[in-house]
Amino acid sequence: MNGTPHKTCAAARARRAKPGANAPPSRREAPGAAGRITGGGGRGGSIKPYHAPYLADPPHHIRGSASLCHTRRMPKRATKYWLIKSEPGTYSIDDLERDRTEPWDGVRNYQARNFMRNMAKGDLAIFYHSSATPPGAVGISHICREAYPDPTQFDKKSKYYDAKSKKEDPRWSHVDVEFVEKFNETIPLQALKDDAALEGMVVTQKGSRLSVQPVEKKHFKRVLKIAGARTKVS
């Protein structure tokens, strides 16, 4: 399947846009495409202690990031793991570190949309830069708001407007993601492919271009180990 860039939300675009300048390009995927994409190198980001006053107990699997997303409860089911892609030139791990939270909007692929609808608060996601040199895993985010209608599908001024989508039965959904940590270095796609412990990981498979992908727990833990990440999964 083909993947194309994802879009940033209007609020994030407004924060980044210079006065009088055009808004930055969208990071969404085009209709029928496979997903949101990113690229780029990585650096170590400072990680603040996890603080979520609206939670009785902070999620046990997160060891970083001040929580700014108003998650009121963690999922009852076991934590699931994901990989989300975005092009660094449109929305990078640095942007998420700065913004702290971001709606993952603009997905126009049904399989990727269905994966997002399967996400629950507290799920963890590898942030992956596509269309970069080299492409690869650059950090960790977590899902802080479960799937809800993507408003851009109803915006006639948006190139992602979908005239067939009805407000009483929205066709497209998105989730909110929150920054957890940035890896000291990018883990290139080739390194992921060369690691025997990551055999079968969706992103390493030929032709795998979905912007939202499930990740097995053993693969997620392996990526954390390779990265020397502060995030821990028990």
Image (cartoon, grey):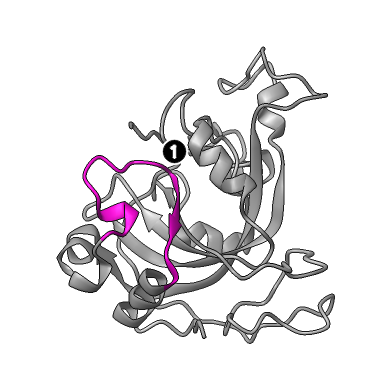
- The answer to whether residue 26 shows anywhere in this view is no
Q: Does residue 143 lie above or below 208 as drawn?
A: below
Q: Whole-percent x and y of residue 95?
A: 51, 57
Q: Most extreme residue toward the top, as rendered?
A: 163
**Image quadrant for the N terminus?**
top left
> How many labels, in total?
1
Decide which of 112, 43 is in the foreground and name it: 112
The image position of residue 175, as x and y in percent, is 65, 49
Between 174 and 197, the one lying in front of the other is: 197
Residue plotted at (54% across, 82% down): 47
Residue 224 visible to the viewer: yes
Locate residue 172, reporting x and y percent.
Answer: 64, 31
Residue count near mark 1 (Cα–Cα under 10 Å), binned few <14, some 14–19, many ≥20: many
Q: Quadrant of residue 139?
A: bottom left
- Where in the figure is residue 40, as x and y percent of width and height? 31, 56
Q: Residue at x 62, y 55 (%)?
A: 119
| Image: 119 above or below 153 | below
Of residues 151 and 217, the one nearer the viewer is 217
**Which residue does the image show at 47% across and 32% down from the upper left?**
29
* Magenta segment includes 213: yes
In the image, is 130 to the left or to the right of 121?
A: left
The range drawn in magenta is 200-217
Q: Circle 1 is placed at which residue position?
A: 35
Q: Secondary structure at mark 1?
A: loop
Residue type marked 1 = Gly
**Splitting the image into 4 quarters, where does residue 155 fall?**
top right
**Hey, which quadrant is residue 150 in on the image?**
top right
Q: Is residue 165 magenta?
A: no
Q: Is residue 207 left or right of residue 47?
A: left
Which residue: 54% across, 31% down? 22
Is 30 on the left or on the right of 228, as rendered? right
Q: 176 above or below 170?
A: below
